[in-house]
Image (cartoon, rainbow, N blue to C red):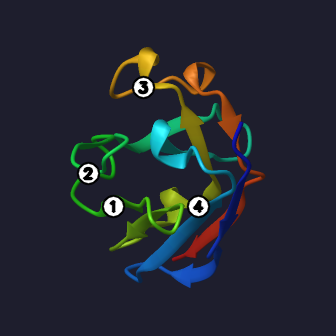
């Protein structure tokens, strides 16, 4: 089992950058593929980016792949999401999540994931 805690959200202006972090508890962090999802009011939770156990392979949604970068540090049990050139439509609650590798990579459906953080709000003003 792993517990996840996100941080780094807040209010920024369009065009700004922001970095989200997710701290994981437990000694098995490197056993999981990790993902970031987001959910805006009235919308379904959507896939943002994923990274495999070693950190050597990543995947991102088309809407963010040229602006967002996912990374992880297995020694520190953290996964991060660097967001550049933010747009108002990026405003949402951002969640990090952990998935067992047998789900395949990348796992892009939220219901594939086994563990979730509580989320952090990102608001981008125009």
Q: Is residue 29 visible?
A: yes
Q: Identify the mark nearer the N-term, 2 or 3.
A: 2
Q: How many marks?
A: 4
Q: Position of residue 108 (x, y in %)?
A: 43, 27
For the point 57% across and 43% down, the residue is: 28
Q: Identify the mark nearer the N-term, 1 or 4.
A: 1
Q: Position of residue 80 (x, y in %)?
A: 46, 64
The residue under label 3 is: 107
The residue under label 4 is: 91
- CA distance separating discs 4 and 2: 16 Å
Q: Position of residue 63 (x, y in %)?
A: 33, 46
As drawn, the residue found furthest toward the right would be 118
Is there CB contact under 8 Å for labels 1 and 4?
no
Q: Nearer the viewer, residue 53 or 79?
A: 53
27 sits to left or right of 109: right
As drawn, the residue found furthest toward the front would be 27
Numbered label attached to residue 65: 2
Q: Identify the mark nearer the N-term, 4 or 2.
A: 2
Local packing at callout 1 (Cα closer than 10 Å; few below 14, some 14-19, many 20+) is: many
Q: Nearer the viewer, residue 31 or 60?
A: 31
63 sits to left or right of 22: left
- CA distance separating discs 1 and 3: 17 Å
- CA distance separating discs 4 and 3: 22 Å
- Foreground: disc 4 or disc 2: 2
């Amino acid at each position: 089992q792993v517990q996840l805690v996100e941080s780094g959200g807040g209010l920024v202006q369009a065009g700004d950058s922001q970095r989200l972090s997710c701290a994981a508890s437990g000694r098995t962090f490197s056993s999981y593929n990790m993902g970031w999802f987001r959910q805006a009011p009235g919308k379904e939770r959507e896939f943002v980016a994923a990274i495999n156990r070693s950190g050597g392979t990543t995947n991102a949604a088309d809407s963010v792949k040229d602006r967002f970068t996912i990374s992880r540090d297995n020694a520190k049990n953290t996964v991060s999401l660097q967001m550049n050139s933010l747009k108002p439509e990026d405003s949402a609650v951002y969640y990090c999540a952990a998935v067992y590798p047998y789900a395949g990579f990348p796992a892009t459906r939220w219901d594939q994931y086994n563990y979730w953080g509580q989320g952090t709000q990102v608001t981008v003003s125009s």
